[in-house]
Every structure is written in C-alpha cells, then in structure tokens.
Amino acid sequence: MRADGTEGSVPVRDLAHRYAALAARLVGVDGAHWWPVEDDGPAGLGGLTRAARAPLAVEDVAADPRTLARAAEALDEGVASFLGAVVRGPGGRTLGVLGVSDPRPRDWDGHLPLLVDLAAAVAGDELVLTDEGPDRAERVRRSLTLGLTGVGRFDVDLTDRTVGWDEQARGLLAAVGSGPREPVDDLAAMIHPDDRFALEVAVERCRAVGGTFDEEVRAWRADGRQRWLRLRGAALGATGTPPAPGSPRLPDLVGIVFDTTPQRREDDGRHALAALPDPFAQFDRVGRFRYLNAAAEQRLRRTLGQVAGRSLWEEFPQLRGGQVEAVFHAAVGRGAPVEVELELVPGSGQWWEVRAWPDPEGLSVAMSQATARRTAQREAEDANRRLRLLAAVTTDLTSTLDLAPAVRRFGQHLVPALGDWCVVSLLDDQDELGDTGWVHADPRARPALEAYVAARPAALPSWADRLVAIGTAPWSVLDGPPRAELLAGLPAGPAGPGTGAAAEAVAALDPGQVVLVPLLARQRPLGLLTVGRGLGAEAWTRPELQLLHDVAGAAALAIDNARLYGRQQSIAESLQRNLLSAPVGTDELQITVRYAPAAEAVRVGGDWYDVFPQADGSTVLVIGDVMGHDVAAAGSMGELRSLLRGTAYATGAGPADLLAQLDATVAGLHRSVIATVLVARLETDEDGTRLRWSSAGHPPMVRLSRAGGVEVVDGFEVAAEPDLLLGIDPTVPRTETVLDLDEGDVVLLFTDGLVERRDQAVDEGLERLAATVEELVASGDLDLEHDLDRLCDGLLARMLPERPEDDVALVAVRLLPTPDEDRRGRLSRDR
C-alpha cells in the first residue's frame, strides 16, 4: 500500500476504521468515525478538530459555542456529543481525525488519553503497512523512531530465537552480552514476571497475524534497579520464509525500546493530583487551561475536555481585574510562588487558600478550603477578645476600694467595642435606681449624653420597673422605637411631650438600637446596663449580646464583692471600736487616740488601748496587741483588757506588778494567749510628775518635749533586754522604768503596725517615726498645746502605706500645765 492509502493489502482507511470501532467499544458508545483530511464530518467536527490542533471534547453540540451554529446538522447525523483526536504521520503530516460520538449529550471524563493513544497507534501502523523494498526493515526501524530521543532499536529472529540490538537498546535493557545477537530467553529473563506473559502474547499475535505490538513492561537492570520500558514492534513477513536468492534475510520482528519511567512518574503524579480532594489546575503562561483534577472540575463546573486550551479569563470573565488575576500575574511575572487567602466570589463568605507557582509550561495552582480555619480563627480571636474584656473589667473593678470611680470607668471598656454609648445604673440600699457612670464614644456627643442622664432621675423608677421585668433574662433589646423608649418619663418641654432639653439630648444621641443588660450577682439584681447604637449601625449579633451579658455578670460580681467587703470592713471596724472604750479624761492630761484598721476585710484584731484611773487617782495608760487577726484575737484582747483594768483598780499595783498578775491569771485560767503589752502609770507629787512603766515585749514609747526634742524611750538603762511577751512564762520577774515629765511633754504609745511591716524592721520604723515627728513639729503648722489630733493624723498619713498590712492603735498623751479653776482636762477622740 502506498502512502496515500489507496493501494496495498491493508488500506489505511480500513485500519483507521478498525481503530475507531475499537475506541467506540472501549468508551461504550455507538458512533465510530474516521475522517481523512478531505472530510470535515458532520457539522464540520473533523475540520474543527484539525483546526484546533488538539484533541476536541464536545459534551453537547447544542450548548457548546464551538458547535452551536451547526448543531442541527450534527443532531441529524445522530451526533449530540463528540470526542476526537488528530492522527499525524511523519513530519507532522495530518492523516485524518479519529473520533467517537454519542446520540445523547455526555461528558468524556477519562476517555481523552485513550483516544490519543489509539490515534498514535493508527499513525504507527500506517508507517509499517505502507513501506516496501529490500531495505524495509531498516526504514521501518527508522520510522518508528521519528521524533523520539533516547530510543534503542532491536530485531527478533524467531528461527534461531535470537535478538539483536544497538548500543542504545543494550544500555536501556542493561544487557550483559557483548555480541551482535543474544538469545531471546535472555531478553525474557530481564522482564518482570508480571509483565512477561502479556509481552509474549502480544509478540505471538503480531507474528501470527501481522501488524504491530506495543507493550509497556518493567525490566530489571544489571544494577538491580527497575525501570519502565516501552517496546513497540512490527512483523515483517511470515515466519520461516526463506529470503529470495541474493537477498539478505529479514528478521521476523523489528522494533524500538525507550524508557518511560519519567512519564510513569509523571502519570503517577497526575493520578495523585486527580485523587486530591482539593482543586488543582494548570495553565499556560497566558492563562489557558492545561489540566484540571476532578475536584477542580467539580468546583468550576467544567470538565477538562470543555476548557482545555481555552482562556481562564474568557471562561470566567468575572475574575478579570480581581484578586485571582492579580495572583496569576504576580506568580508568572515574578517567577516565584505566591500564597494568599481570598474569596473567589467576593461576599460569599467562602474563603480559599490559593497557592500558585510557576512550572516549565506555565503555572500550577492549588486551592484548599480556608473557610473553616478562618471561622475557627475568628472564633478564637473573639474568645480572646471576650477574655481580655472580662479580665480588664474584673481587674479594674477589683483593683480599688473606691467603687464609684471604678463603676464610672466600667463603660469605657464597652464603648466603642460593643456600642456607641452606655449608661451604668445601680440600686442603692433602698432599691432605688441611680445612674453612676456613662460614656459616649464620640466626644462631640458626650454633652448630649450628659444632658440625657441629667434629665433621667424622674424616669428612673420606670427603668427600675424594666429591671424587675427583665428578671434573670440575660438581656432585653427594646422592641419599640428607641427614641420614644428613651423619652418615656423624661420631663416635657414648654411645648409638651417630646420637646425641651431632654428631647433634644435624645435626638442628638440618634438612637437606632438599645439593649438593656441586668447586672446580676448571686441571683440578685444590682443594677442595669443600658447600651445604645446609633441609627444605621449594624444590629447586635448573638455573640455580642452574650459578651455584654458575660461582662455585665463579671462587673456585677465585682461590684457585689466590693459592697460586701465594705460592709464587712465597716462591721469589723465598729466591733473593734466598740471593744475600745473612750479613755477617761483627767485634769492632768490631754489624751487623743486613733485606731486604723488593716486594708483586708474583716480584720478584727487584737490591738487595743486603754486609759483609766486607779483608786488612788493615778492614771493608767495601756497599749497592747494580742497575736492574731481574727475574732478569737479580738475576744482575747477583750478578756485581757477587762482583767487588767479590774486588777489595776482593785489592787492599785504598779505597772510591773500588774503585768505579772495578769500573766499569772492568764496561765491559771489556761488561756492560750500571747500578747505584747505596755502599762504606764502617771504619778504626781510635790517633786513633779513621773511616768512609771513596764513593757511585756511591746514597742517603746516616743517622747516629744515641749521644746521640740524627740526621743525613743526604750528603758534599756534598766534592763539590757526587753521583758518577755505576756503568756510565755508567768514566773519571770517584770521590770519597771521611770520617766520624768515636764509640763507640755507629749508621750506617744502605739502598736507595731505603725513602725513594722514586711519591708521595714522595727528599729528602722522607730527611727522613721522619730524623724516624722520632728518634721511635723519643724513644719510650723503644729501647735502641740492644741493639736494632738493633727499630730496623730499626720503621723498615720505619713507612716502608713496606702493599704496597711496591720492594725494600728495610737495614743498621744500631753501633760497639761498645773490646773486652775478655769482649766479642765480636755479629751478628744477620733470619730
């Protein structure tokens, strides 16, 4: 047969038709077509395929723009869908179009590679069947290798069962022999056992009936590596036919062999890409489709057959000028990977992570859903924001004992994050609602909010009713028009309801939405949080309302705890003060006392002071501190105070004897009490006034002379060490010290809380106390004759930290000048 296909034993036209019929059977359709170059086929499908210079897939001729104009003609021929491939001969010469069709629309997923392979087989067999002449074997071998590189040649003589190969084939097969021909069995031994039988069958069929064979097999190389090899061959004549006289003997089979391992790997990669659950696509450098996996086809609602070779921007014009086109040109232009997150359809809420990177033929693009991750990230950010807001509110409300300014700051945490403005209202002890804090995000609107709050007192009873109506509900969004709701109960202007300053303030607020959130703590309402947004603002989402509820709950609990703390501290101070009776005044002494509780709640402690007369008229001063800061310590302090006072009056004993008797009494009554106590008695006779005193481990006194001198009176001139604390050993003798006093002298008695704390030892505190007294006297603002109150208050203000760690009892005693009929002892006590 000649190359034009018009002569020979097997016409090319018949061969192509056989391959077309084979394709139709494999695909599962009835239409099988072979259109040579002069035949365009129904509706010009053959010409259209040749013009495309690429495989053509048409799922519906009536819907595809490429075939729409001649769809009726194709349908009349029973072609509703079509798949075709160009068959090309040597030099790229077009031989025709091989195609299959279906009378119904359908997709051609997965069938395009099959048709392309069959078209190549037609071209290969045409080359074998149309060549003639004595050098036919060599020409066929050369024709089989046209356009191929890395291809080896071989031939098989089945008479002597030998195979011959060139150096390229020997290298590919890793043959160990060096002769021109080797046994066929040696070739068979190189083939993987699973592929050997299929190759033998193909070769035997080719030998028996003619034609070609084409098999891909795994072969073991001499170095132990496995490679994929493709063997293509053709039969040259009947086996065993002797050559004509003078003619060379032709082999039975000739063929080529080439390595397909890289293609196999690429195919494996394509299979892996096809199986990816996320979309993957490949484009050329101008955006024409090269490849789509199944996930991409599903996402784009297009098959590869529909879009292969078509422009992305033509198929999806809505993507032009958007982020997708920007990513494409950025990756191609820079020649570097680009990774972004974007909405393919803006406003859809569907986010994708897009990764684009250049490849040798254009651009590869992989996409994965990012919506769930972004949603989780947003939820995590919202949760963090909620926790930060809750922490800020809780910290702000619990970091101070002054609740009022903290409540006023509360709204600043909510605005503008959750509203444009807010008002915080609290119930007082009579369950009357009062506004305690308000804030607006816009400084220009703050005067309007302040004017609205100023007009609210008349309307607050109705807001208290709203609080009752809400009950334990988490929130209540006002149903009625917000402006009318805010105006309800406000004073009317001269022109009637809805006019006047209050109405103007509400109008300036321009409320679009208002939500009421009860401040609930321990199932009790403490107040109401009113939050507003301006007209046109977005409505609150449920997470935002839930956050308002959570913040209001945290604030309410902090407010309730602060109130409970205040009540408990007040109770503790009242109890402590009630245990400390007013000192008894005398004509000889001016006495001022102070008691400062520690910062912690319910710190009822054991600090006490006392001033009382003995039966002989002497005045006894007592300062003491029972160990402990609880109700038990306070009770023990009350017992010691009563025992000491009763013993002193009944016995008239001096300070050392009083402490010894008190120590023995405590031991005898089996009271487990440890305390520091300082007892001093003022004694006056014709020789002057003396202060006799004894200390059971208590801090020393400080004397301030009328002339302004300050000294710490520790009594170490009598005893090198201070006496033991009360309650340790009642048998140890007690010592006394006598201090001479002049008129106008001031003596300070105090507990250790004034001079001792964690970062300051007692000795340091005593030095600091003496220095502070000197500073107060030197300031010139202190008249000791009249200002013991200012002296005591000044000492407490300068000596104590903002949050005292311990209770402090302080007694200041000034020796008055000799009394006459017009001068009486004066007594003052802190309020």
Image (cartoon, grey):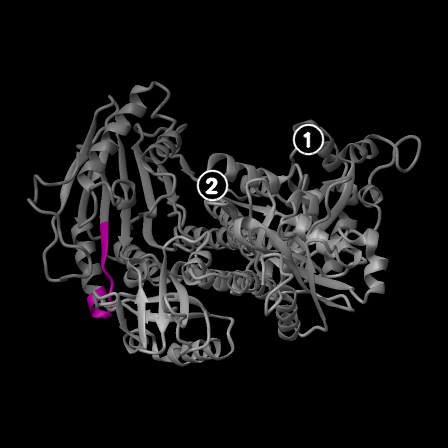
Which residue lies most toward the top here? 780
Magenta stretch contains residue 676: yes
Magenta stretch contains residue 251: no
Which residue lies most toward the left here? 720
Q: Any mark on residue 831, and which?
A: 2
Q: Position of residue 758 (x, y in %)?
A: 25, 45
* Above or below for 748 versus 269: above
Q: Position of residue 41 (x, y in %)?
A: 75, 58
Which part of the image, by quadrant, shows the N terminus? bottom right
Please rate how many residues cluster around mark 2, counting C-alpha atoms within 10 Å: few if below 14, some from 14 to 19, many from 20. few
Q: Any mark on residue 497, and which?
A: none
Front residue (pair 129, 730)? 129
| Residue at the (18%, 34%) spot, across then down | 712
| Residue marked by disc 1 | 446
* Above or below for 510 versus 574: above
Helix, strand or loop at mark 2: loop
Which residue lies most toward the right here? 495
* Above or below for 458 versus 601: above
| Residue at the (72%, 42%) spot, across then down | 533
CA separation in Å, label 2 and label 1: 40 Å
Q: Which residues are magenta?
A: 666-677
